[in-house]
Amino acid sequence: MKERLSLLAVVLMVFTSCQKKHEAIIITPEEYHKSVDKVIEVMIHDIFSPPVASRIFAYPNIAAYEIIAQKDDRYKSLAGQIHDLTPIPEPKTRDSINFEVAALVAHMQLDKNLIFSEDRIVSYRDSLYAVWADKNEPVFNASKAYGLEVAEHIAAWMNKDNYKQTRTMPKFSVNSEDPSRWQPTPPAYMNGLEPHWSKIRPFAIDSADQFKPAPPPDFSMEEGSKFYEEVMEVYEVRKSMIGKGDKSDEIAIAQFWDCNPYVSVTRGHLMFATKKITPGAHWIGITKIAARKSDADFAKTVYAYTKTSIAIADGFISCWDEKYRSNLIRPETVINEYIDDSWEPVLQTPPFPEYTSGHSVVSGAAAIALTDIFGDNFAFDDDTEVAYGLPVRSFSSFNQASDEAALSRMYGGIHYRAAIEVGIKQGRSLGKYIVDKLDMTKG
């Protein structure tokens, strides 16, 4: 009798073990949010420039989206819609693949390929792999294999976008004889970042100069000239804040939208960088907020990140094309040279030319994409900067947030009005073009 009971116990243990190995692997939108958060964490650690960071967002999201579009009839492939992207391989056996797992595998694989600190992604990835394999090893293995196959396909396309070639192109040459041209700014006096970014293959726009803006006001420090008026506006806005103290709303807005990953801090003979998110990462954070608030499912979450990251990436290509064309001097340099040598901006001046404002262009483009996905008048509380010691700010719409992001650059003392107003227009025109061009949803 005891032998029979022991045999029955063994059979039950084997049966239970087999049952455990064949549980359904349930993937929620939160797991995708966490994957995006992880790569942002690594990007902050590795310190990528805003344009390069936008590229890191775009490709992994596109890979995940293409996999989801294979499964979900609500979404259409981007193949043939964005430059040079061909259809991803179709799965050999659909029944054995969890497409959400495959999407995350592809996302993390490309994340790993695009950042420096690969070990941080690998550690996170392997922890998820262990959980999924424990639930259902056959499905996990099939899904992983398909995700890696798609990642390889996207990587081959990605590697032809001219990024590697721009790594070997010459540094930006500063023209110190022309008073209108950009000069390196304190405290680090860094070289101009990514002067060849306009040569990167765009995603949806036709070319880097498709949304070429009107040129900035002509450089002139004569009283009454348009340029002089804009310089004095930046100067006076900063002076007005001094009387209000550090608690002014203008300073709060400037700091909230700073998003400068290159802030250098000098203490004695030491100089080090404080680490922050980029403008693109801030809008990716807003995408997460909107997806959560609207209770978006996994597929819509991936779709939202993908469309927004394409708008951000093309926004940087368009903006950087103009920055190094107009090559305009920053307010800090002009004001110190002609008006007040002790004047300092609220924010540290980023190391590249002034016109147009990158945050304005990218915010305008991202806001249009997000409005298309989640609707106009989508109110939200933006807690993206809480991790950096800044309070939540609330907005009635994505466009209102983009207006504030743009204006923050004047409050910060790093942009003139023309760069802000023309920049937001440039970004919104680009965003509308992308929304109208990309046919991503059915019905």
Image: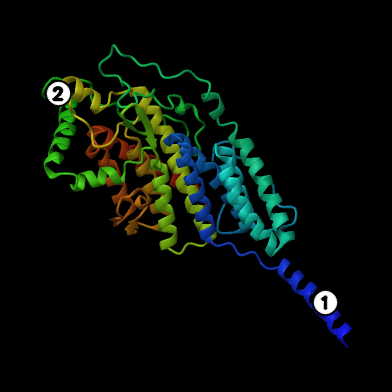
Q: Is residue 273 above or below residue 183?
A: below
> Spatial distance from mark 1 to mark 2, Cα to Cα?
87 Å
Numbered-mark total: 2
Of badges 1 and 2, nearer the viewer stands 1
Q: Where residue 412 sits: x, y (%)?
A: 25, 38
Q: Is residue 385 above or below residue 19?
A: above
The residue lying toward the viewer, choosing from 87 and 277, is: 277
Which disc is residue 11 wearing? Answer: 1
Residue 185 appears in the picture as rendered: yes
Identify the residue at image location x=42%, y=53%. 287
Q: Where residue 319 sits: x, y (%)?
A: 38, 32
* Element carrying mark 2: loop
Q: Where residue 266 sits: x, y (%)?
A: 32, 31
Q: Where residue 123 sits: x, y (%)?
A: 60, 48
Q: Quadrant of residue 392?
A: bottom left
Q: Is residue 409 above or below residue 215?
A: below
Q: Quadrant of residue 279?
A: top left
* Element carrying mark 1: helix
Circle nearer the N terminus (1, 2): 1
The residue where tag 2 is placed is 339
